[in-house]
Amino acid sequence: MSDTSKVSKAEAEVEQSTVAPADDPTAAPVAVVDPRLLVREEGLKGYVTEFKRKIKGGELGSLPVFVGLIVIWTIFQTQNDRFLSADNLSNISYFLSATGMLAIGLVFVLLLGEIDLSVGSVSGLASTVFAVFVVNHSMNQWLALFLTVLTGAAIGALQGWFFARIGVPAFVVTLAGFLGWSGLMLWLLGSSGTINIPAETGPVHLLGQSSFFMDQAVIGAYLLAGLAVLSMLVGSFMEQRRRKAAGVPFRPTSEILLRVVALAVAAFAAAAVLNNASGVSNALVIFLASLVIVDFVLRRTTYGRKIFAVGGGIEAARRAGISVPMVRISVFAISGSFAAIGGMFFAGQTASATLNAGGGNTLMLAIAAAVIGGTSLFGGRGNVWSALLGMLVIQSIQTGLDLLNMNTSIQYMITGAVLLGAVVIDSVSRKSQKAAGRA
Amino acid sequence: MVHVSATPVLALRGVSKRFGAVQALTDVELEVHAGEVVALVGDNGAGKSTLVKTIAGVHPIDEGVIEWEGKAVSINKPHDASGLGVATVYQDLALCDNLDVVGNLYLGRELKHRGAIDEVTMEQKARELLSTLSIRIPSVRIPIASLSGGQRQVVAIARALIGDPKVVILDEPTAALGVEQTAQVLDLVERLRERNLGVILISHNMADVKAVADTVAVLRLGKNNGSFSVKDTSHEEIIAAITGATDNAVTRRAGRRSAEAAK
């Protein structure tokens, strides 16, 4: 999806025609494109050679995810033939959204090349804070939701402040937060250990397992899929037209159609599967909507560009007039907010705030999801869709292990191995990117 | 010699800067006119980098006046300098390796289209700018990481031009470059002059200075040690000013004699 893939033959031709400046008659006309430079050929063959070059250069992108998904799904399907059933896939799609929210926040932090170890604890604390507001103080649920997310943002901003202004390594600050916030959660829960949240209406109901988009109407899922495909189609062609008008390289129509068809197949297949079960859960819809919004913020706004700049070179960012501390603090605040929203999703799953919310391996799963999806731990590279792709892998493993009635001990070991594997892939691909002059 | 306007676009009058116990700059004077390339030379530790950093707003000055188009201004942070129209290209370029050429050119001043970054116009303008400067790079959409040293240097200089500055400061632009890339960068400096920009060029390389500069300002131990017009000054005279070969017991005695004689 990178912009470099837009190098088409059209660009090559435009640049080939450029000659040396007229004020220098002795200079021979020189093609702007260096003959040693690889320019992608048009058509299917071009895709294949480009693909091979990228793999060699370590630009794996989302490839490990797709390979991983196919492997995981095959293994679990052979072990238990209910794994690829509509009901189980629907389960995966519902449960991935909670940890996925945490992973979105982590993508922001990882883009800076930092880490936030507190997101699990903050999500647990958020569900408790919400429960305390609603149950103990009889607050309106939507107001409580707002205050809960605000709490998450404040916690993140505080941690970001220690990191950006005091200069404490983010790893240590958030490790302290990891302990401290879960301590605060235990203290708030007190002796009862669990607070049940009324879930007939309000956000907790919305995020619950029995809440579906458009009340399970069959058309709902297809409507969403159609909307996604249509907006990609229209967006791509509008972009193509603007680029044509501006005289800059544009994606050929064949490529756009190929992409749109690929998305349409995936989206409508998913819609059909989910409809076969019980519909699209509202939690998933909110997760997907968040992804779209965050993707826009990261790629198309100056704020997103600042995050990438700080992740790619702090000194360059500072010289460009970007306030590095503000970017850092705000990114940690965003991470805290998404952790709090994720905590609400956890609360929605059980309609309660419990002692072990956000505990266990929640944090590890969220980090693993972001990294597996293709966001680099080293900063500056990645996108928010990695939260979705990574969570598909992670949640498939979780659900699969549950189906096989695996012990928690085995689950931990497998999750640990997957996280390590993802980081190894990231490190190795970064190394070969360096060797290929792309990092 | 190109036409030089009467009022310097940038002038430093009696600028001093201290870092703790170190007097980095003492009473330094410097004038830059539009369409003029001023080479700032001096030995290591002479205060060249400190001087450009005071102009760029990295280090605020302790004493003295900075005049911009004849009016005294205060430059306390990099933002002040860029607001006036001073663009600085540091030796370590400071480009974001992960962003593409367009992204780096417009970093910190992205163009907008309906609230979103306008990639199309930015790409179009970037290509225009690079082609008017005859800068050759494979594509404006490849990450900086895959460019060569010379290509990065010209991208960094082009980046300085995006904000339409009036004065461009180049800190050792040719230091790490090969023969051909050096020639390209020097060509680029001449094109900046043709655009009627004031250029401050820091360099250790006398050949480069002689090739493109109009005026040479020499710093020695944080003080002015002469300002020369390039075309009527020999290589040796500049070197002598840099190394302080003129500043020894003999010349001081001669100086006193002539001062006494003048009375």
Image (cartoon, coloured by chain):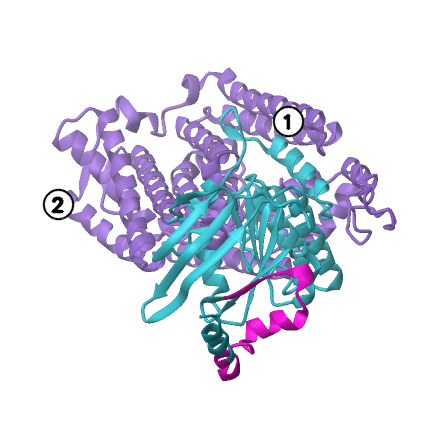
Q: Which of marks 1 and 2 is nearer the N terminus?
A: 2
Kindly state the secondary structure of the residue where label 2 is placed: loop
Foreground: B196 or A414?
B196
- Tell me, by letter, which chain the rendering colours purple: A
Could you tell whether B24 is left or right of A57 in the image?
Answer: left
| Position of residue A278 measured from the top left corner of the image (x, y, whole percent) | 45, 24
Q: Is residue A365 visible?
A: no
Report whether residue B51 is seen.
Answer: yes
Q: Relative to residue B181, is residue A1 drawn left or right?
A: left
Q: Which of B65 and B59 is in front in this view?
A: B65
What is the magenta range? B225-253
Q: Which chain is cyan?
A: B
Say which residue appears at 48% left-offset and 50% top-offset.
B11
Residue A403, how many percent across, how many down?
44, 44
Q: Is residue B204 left or right of residue A294?
A: right
Question: Residue B73 in magenta?
Answer: no
From the image, which quarter does the C terminus of chain B lie in? bottom left
The local secondary structure at tag 1 comes to helix
- For residue A4, side relative to residue A408 (left or right): right
Residue that label 2 marks: A190
Q: Which mark is residue A239?
A: 1
Q: Give residue A207's mark.
A: none
Mark 1 and mark 2, same subunit? Answer: yes
- In this view, A384 is above or below A71: above
Q: Would you say residue B250 sits in the magenta stretch?
A: yes
